Image (tube, helix red, strand yellow):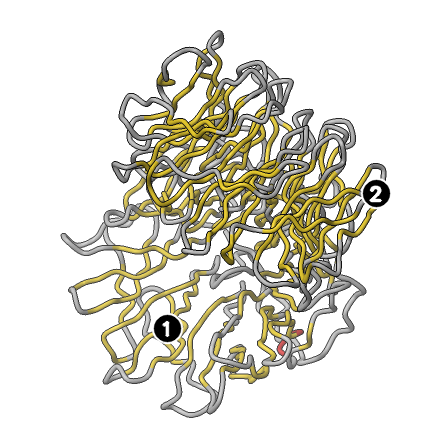
Amino acid sequence: MRHACIRVAVLAAGLFAVLPLRATPLAPGPVDLGTLGGSPFPVHVAQFNGFGRKGTVVGSTTKVGTGEVPFAWTSATGFRVITDQLGFGAGANNLGQVIGSLTPFGQPSQGFFWSPPGTLVAITSPLALAVYPRAVNDAGQVAGEIDATAGGHHAFLWTASNGLKDLGSLGGDQLLVTGMSGTGVIIGQASDASGNTHAFSWKSGNSIKDLGTLGGIYSYATAVNDAGTIVGYSQGTDFNSHGFVFMNNRMTALDSPTGTSVANAINHSGTIVGSSVTGGALIWVPGASAQVIPGIDFAVDINDNGRVAAYAVEPYDQSTHAFLWSASGGLVDAGSEDESSSYPLGVTSDDRLVANRVDWAGVTKVYVWKPGGPRALLDGLGGGFSRALFVNASGQVAGVSRTILGYDRAFVWSAATGMVEVPAPAGFNSTPADFNASGGIVGSTIRGRVGLVTPGPSFFWPGSGTTYTDFGSSILVGVNDESQVLGYANPGAAFVWSGGTYTTIPAAPGAQIVPAALNLHGQVVGYYLPTPFTMHAFSWKPAAAAIVDLGTLGGTHSLAVAVNASGQITGTSSLTGDVTSHAFRTTAGHKMTDLGSLFGATANSSSVAMNTDGNVTGYDTGPTDFHVFLYDGKLHDLGALGGSNPQIWGINDSKDVVGWRLDPATGPHAFVCFGGAPMTDLPAFPGQDSSQAFGINNAGDAVGNALLPDGQRRALIWYTR
C-alpha cells in the first residue's frame, strides 16, 4: 500500500471534502535522514609500489567538494588525506613516507614527497616540464619519470638534499619506471631510437642501462630486490614471452612448463613468482625448476615469508578473484560474497593482502586482510548516497542507501530509530517497491557488475526482525496495510499473497495479467492482454471468479494505475483512433469518466496517482512541455514541469501533490502543490544543486532527496504542514 508515492493512490478511509485552493507556508527544512554509512566514490591504489611492505596503502580518493586527492592509510592511523590539492599517491616506503603527483586542473603534473605527520615537499626542477614519481625507498630516494625540458620522457632520481637528477632515457620518447630497490637501483622500460621497448636499470655512478632482450624485440622489467636482482619478461627468438632474471649483467630466461611465462615479483631470498601465459601461476625457488601453483592463474607479489598474492579468472564472466598462497599454508580464498570481483595488489611483510574490490554497485574500493582476521575496508572520505521514496501515515520513510560494504540497500527510517537497513541476501542490492502503514516493504534485489546484471529474489519484509519472505523470481508491485502482497510471474499468473497463502488472479486462457496496485480490501487493478494487439485495464476483487474488463475510452488500449479504499480506479486510456490518450476515473462495472485535457480534446493526459476521495493527479501534454493537473470534479492546471520527462509522484487527502520539475539551467527541483494551488519549490538542502520529491502523506510529510554538485544524494523529509 503506497502512501502518496509512485503512480498509485493513498489508501486510507475518509470523507470527501472540497478544499479551497490555497498556498500554505512551508516549514523550515528539509531534514537530512542520513545514510547507511557507505561512500559512493571509488578508491584507487597505485598499481606499482602502491604501499610499503609494512602496510602503508596509498592512492587517490574523492573528497567532497574537491575531487580526486591523494591519501595514505595505515592500520595505526587509518585513512587520511595527504593534501586537499588534486592528485594521487603513487608509492610509500616502510617509514610511512609517501610520494605521488599533484595534478592542478589545466596544469602539468608535479611530484610531492610527504612525511608523517604532515610535511609536504614539492618535487620540481627546471629540468622537468612535469614530474611523475613512481617509487620511494627507506633512504628517501624517489624515482620516476619526467617530461624533460630537453624533450621526451626521462627517468629521474630525487632526494630532499640533492634535488632532482635527470637520468636520461634509451633514446626514444617513452619511458616508465616500475620499481626501485632499497639500495637505489631503479628499473623500468623505455623505447629506444628504433621504437622498440626494452627493460632498463640505473644505479648510482652509472648511466641508464639497456638490459637487452631474450632475442626478440621487447623486454619489460617488473621488480627488483635489494640485492639488485631484476625480473621481468621478454620476447624470445620463438616470438613468445618468457620470464627472465637479470643478474651479473646477464639476462637469463626462466624455465616454464608451457614454455611461455612472465615474472612479476621477487623477494629478498630470490624467490620469483609470475605466470605461465597459458598454464597458471608459477613460482621459481632458487636452485629449483619452476613449479605450478595449483588453483590460481596469476601470481602478482611475494613477501619475504613466501606468502604470495595471486588471483584466478572466473571462466563464466572473466572477473578476477583474489587469493593468498604459501607452501606451508596452501591456497587461502581472499574473496567474499560482498564483492563482484577482487584483484590483489600485493602482500605486506606481516602477510596481509592488499587488494582492490569491486562491490555489487560497481564501485572500486580497497581492503587489507590477513587470514583469520577481519577486513580493513578503505571506504574513502566523505560522501554518501541515500534517497527517500515512500512515507507512511506514521511518518516512517522507506528508500535506498549505500552501506559500508558497498551495497545499495532498502532502508526504513523513523525519527526514533534513524535509518535501519532492511535484510537482504548477501551479494545483492535491494530496492523497495511499496511500503505499508506498519513499515512493511516489498521490493526486488539485483546483483550487478559491469557487463552482467543478475536479478535476485523479490522479498517482503514485515517491518521488523531479520527475516523476510523470499518470492523468488516473481515481480512484486504492492503491499497493503493488511500485509497482503501483490505480484506476478513474468510471464505468468498474477497473485495476491497473504500469510503464506497464494491466490491466483484468474484470466482468460493465454491472457497475461500485469497488476499495478491493490487497496485495503485486496481489490487489484492493472492491465491485461485480451488479444496480442489490445491492452485493457482490469479490476479484480477477492473470491471473484473472473476479472472485470474496465474497457477503454474508445481506443484499443487502457491501463489502471491506482485504486482507493472506496473502489475508485484511475488510469489512462486511448481514445477512438488510438491517436490521443486521456486520464480516466471509474469503478468496476461502470463506464469510464474521461478526465479530459488542459489543452483541448486532442492533447494527451495521463493519470499518475489518486487519493482517498478520488482526486486524481497526473500530467498533461502542453504546447511546449508537460503540465501537472489535479482533477477534483474539475481540471486544474498546477503549472509547467519543464522539459519532456514528466515527474509527478504522489497526492494526499488534502490534495497536496508532490514531484519535481525540470529547470533547464539548474536541473530538477522538488515541488509541492498545496491543495490544488500552483506548484511551490520545496526548500533547498544546504549545498544543494537540485532535488526530487517522491511521496507525501496526509500529515504533509514529503520525502525525496537532494542531488548535490559532487554527485552525492541525500534522503530528505520536508514537514510542509
SS state under label 2? loop
Residue 413 visible to an observer of this rendering: no
Q: Which mark is residue 117?
A: none
State the residue position of label 1: 572
Locate the C terminus and report the quarter of the image it occupies: bottom right
Residue 126 image position (x, y, % from top left): 75, 61
Residue in the picture at 37% in, 73% down: 572
Q: Residues within 10 Å of mark 1 (few under 14, many from 20)?
A: many
Residue 575 image position (x, y, % from top left): 29, 82
The foreground one among 430 and 418 is 430
Q: Amino acid at mark 2?
A: Ser
The foreground one among 203 and 301 is 203
Viewed as shown, does residue 471 lie left or right of 376?
left
Front disc: 1 or 2: 2
The foreground one among 123 and 475 is 123
Q: Amino acid at mark 1?
A: Thr
Mark closest to the chain's N terminus, 1 or 2: 2
Viewed as shown, does residue 611 lie left or right of 454?
right
Residue 512 visible to an observer of this rendering: yes
Q: Residue 68 lies in what quarter of the image?
A: bottom right
Q: Are marks 1 and 2 in contact (CB under 8 Å)?
A: no
Viewed as shown, does residue 92 lie left or right of 662?
right
State the residue position of label 2: 161
